[in-house]
Amino acid sequence: MRYPLGFIGAGNMSGAIIKGLLNAGTAPGDLLICARTQATLDTYQALGCATTLDASEVMRTCDAVMLGVKPQMLKDVLQPLADEAQAHQPLLLSVVAAIPATSIERWLGGNLAIIRTMPNTPSLVKQGATGLYANERVTDAQKSLAETTFAGIGRYSWVDNEADLHAVTATAGSAPAYFFQFAESMQKTALELGLTDAQSRTLIGQTMLGAATMILETDTDIAQMRKNVCSPNGTTERAIQSFQTDDIDAVVRRAMLACLERSEELSSELGDA
Ligand SMILES: NC(=O)C1=CN([C@@H]2O[C@H](COP(=O)(O)OP(=O)(O)OC[C@H]3O[C@@H](n4cnc5c(N)ncnc54)[C@H](O)[C@@H]3O)[C@@H](O)[C@H]2O)C=CC1
Ligand SMILES: O=C(O)[C@@H]1CCC=N1
């Protein structure tokens, strides 16, 4: 039996991709999922996917293999799979933050086509944002396959320079959490102001979706859209003045640079240069 796509690791991120692909119409039987526990496999079996506890089966039977384990585990997971990888030469798609393609290639014995991806969890609802980087062995057909996969669960953008994936992590991979943090803070105040959990969830979620849709579907500058909400001496102006007094640009910049710095640190701590 051969499968177009296999997964080694099926946690939060790979799980979002798998479920996003199924929502987008991928046939469940086209996916082979490898996880460490039978309980996780049961979840995917119930969705109709093929499953295995044996990662070498994924290397042996899949045309493309998505790597979805934690950066700290990747070397130990990959090294025992080198013979299978060399014998079968699947396309490798890594969602693993920070670990360079050269390390993945070395741990698997060399000479492999690798696409590093930096997706995010809104892939679950077909609204993912993914950065893609291909090493020099990836063919145009393999790039198209990655594009089809990630276009099915959101939007993607290629980077030519692998180091730019650190910036993609700070701007998209980690960024759903920034917006959840902001929504969480807004919800606390909305509850304090007397709205219910359900009312605040609907109003905050729909407002974020509306603002995001305007960013994607109009050419208007983001700063201009913000100004358009602010009537002179009106309500929004007061809120924005409060954010600016607290130097929101500096707060956001510090957080994004902290994220980027951690990605660079993980790369040098865990990658084999
Ligand atoms: N969570 C997120 O929003 C994002 C995560 N990533 C990357 O995705 C990767 C996974 O992150 P999460 O999904 O959040 O972690 P997670 O801990 O939810 O998932 C990792 C999964 O890998 C499994 N695993 C470990 N060793 C295995 C093995 N030998 N065979 C099969 N499965 C094995 C674990 O049991 C676990 O279910 C990380 O490298 C992270 O950098 C990338 C972008 C966003
Ligand atoms: O927090 C992390 O390390 C991973 C990578 C991007 C999002 N989550």
Image (spheres, rainbow, N blue to C red):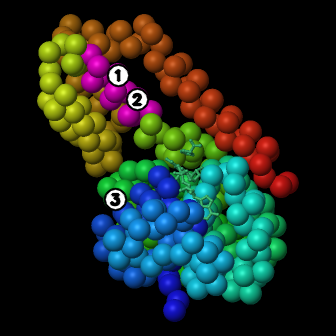
For label 3, count other residues whose C-alpha is less than 10 Å away and answer few (under 14), some (14-19) or many (20+): many
| 184 drawn magenta | yes
Left or right: 138, with 20 as reference point: right
From what the image shows, is residue 99 above or below residue 102? above
How many angstroms separate mark 3 from mark 1 (CA)?
25 Å
- Name the residue rendered at 60%, 43% in the picture: 167
Left or right: 211, with 245 as reference point: left
- In the structure shown, which secondary structural element does the residue marked by tag 3 occupy? loop
Q: Which of 116 and 70 is in front in this view?
A: 70
For the residue marked with disc 3, what is the amino acid?
A: Lys
Q: Nearer the viewer, residue 184 or 115?
A: 184
Q: Which residue position holds label 2?
A: 181
Is residue 89 at all visible to an observer of this figure?
Answer: yes
Q: Residue furthest front?
A: 38
For the residue marked with disc 2, what is the amino acid?
A: Gln
What range of the chain is rendered magenta?
A: 178-189
Q: Which residue position holds label 1?
A: 185
Q: Nearer the viewer, residue 267 or 238?
A: 267
Q: Which residue position holds label 3?
A: 126
Q: Do the residues labelled 2 and 1 touch (CB within 8 Å)?
A: yes
| 206 drawn magenta | no
- In the structure shown, which secondary structural element does the residue marked by tag 1 occupy? helix
